[in-house]
Image (cartoon, rainbow, N blue to C red):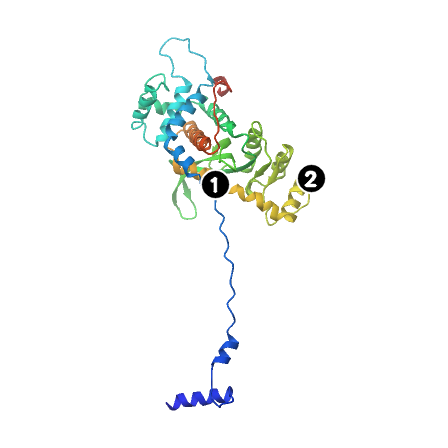
Amino acid sequence: MKMIETAKDKVIELYPTDSGQCTFEPIVKEQVEEPVEIPKKLRLTYPQNWSAYNKAQTSEKHFIMRILDELVAQINEERSTGKGRPPIPIRDQIFAMCVHQYCGKSSRRTTCELTEAYDKHYLFQKLHFSTLLKFYENPKLTELLKQLIELSSIPLAEVENHFSVDSSGFSTSQYKRWFDIKYGRETNLRLWKKAHITSGAKTNIITAVKVTEGYEHDAKFLPELIRTTNKNFKIDYVSADKAYLSGYNLEVIYKIGAIPLIPFKANSRGRARGKLFWRRAYFFFKHNNSEFKKYYHLRSNVESTYSMIKRKIGHKLRAKGETNQTNEILVKCLLHNLIVLCHEVFELNLDIDFIDKNNLSTNQGD
């Protein structure tokens, strides 16, 4: 009690009042500030058309088989006139490969789906599961699959004008061994393939694709991908990450009439060194950064494209040969485009018809 009374006397001595008694209320009111109301940051959301989404999801398989049948019908294949058993048509090979990848099962467990496709007259003959695996070895299919990917993107030519370029890896079941000098032992490294694509920022449609080894640099493939996309689309913007930054890539994009949205590195300078395109892009990035970011953030949609492929169709390659793995990735990209078309038919009320639009020749793959 003596300690408490001493403390009270000390407070009265420091903060006296007229009545000689200490009160803490005026002191507290002077020290406490009124709370400031911080406005909540509104979260940007994108509404989902659930009615269209449900229709697309429930009819996706039948839609893919119908559109795929129209696509492969554009392949002009010369009939074999030699002796022996006639070869399986190219269109049947591609159709069967797409069914195999869409199911995500082994070749044996895909037999039921292939039989269903035969019963619906999508295939000319029933296929054995071992024959299905041999289709991936056909080098003629590589170029044809690329053309089918380009053809399947054309229905969205009026929708897309902003395109993004990026690459991503697909793991295999193979490993590479080398002797690690630092640790004095052998080390295993999983081999993988890399897919370089151009995709639309609005619908995630793939307009061009290039499959390479896992350690190929990204920048040198941008011109080929952009020129391929420019054949069927009007390109206004091209976005890519810093790995694609080079004077030649900027020049290619500017020459097709598009605006490059490639961020510069921390050590980049605005000196042109004979490249006017470099200086123009640098000053747009530095002095109009808010406008640059307004469009550049759409580049993230190409990451969504890869996410869609790997989650729905698979991120691992079952094939072991070089040609087999390349064709497997191309089939995945073709299936992705067909899935996108299925959803956009219900979202945008598109009318898709590939009959007699383009003809593909099997001779181009030789």
Between 205 and 241, the residue placed more toward the observer is: 205
Q: Residue at x 68, y 45 (%)?
A: 271
**Mark 1 Cα shell of 10 Å, populated few (<14), some (14-19), many (≥20):** some
Between 99 and 249, the residue placed more toward the observer is: 99
Image quarter of residue 261? top right
State the image coordinates of residue 193 (x, y, percent, origin top left): 44, 35
Q: Which mark is residue 276?
A: 2
Q: Is residue 112 above or below residue 23?
A: above
Which dot, 2 or 1, sits closer to the camera?
1
State the image coordinates of residue 80 (x, y, percent, origin top left): 42, 11
Q: Residue at x 65, y 45 (%)?
A: 284
| Label 2–label 1 contact, CB within 8 A | no
Q: Which image quarter holds the N terminus? A: bottom left
The type of residue carrying mark 2 is: Leu
Between 343 and 112, the residue placed more toward the observer is: 343
The secondary structure type at the circle numbered 1 is helix
* Disc with the residue nearer the chain's start (2 vs 1): 2
Inspect this view and state whether residue 121 appears: yes
Residue at numbered disc 1: 303
State the image coordinates of residue 75 (x, y, percent, origin top left): 46, 18
Image quarter of residue 336? top left
State the image coordinates of residue 53 (x, y, percent, origin top left): 41, 36
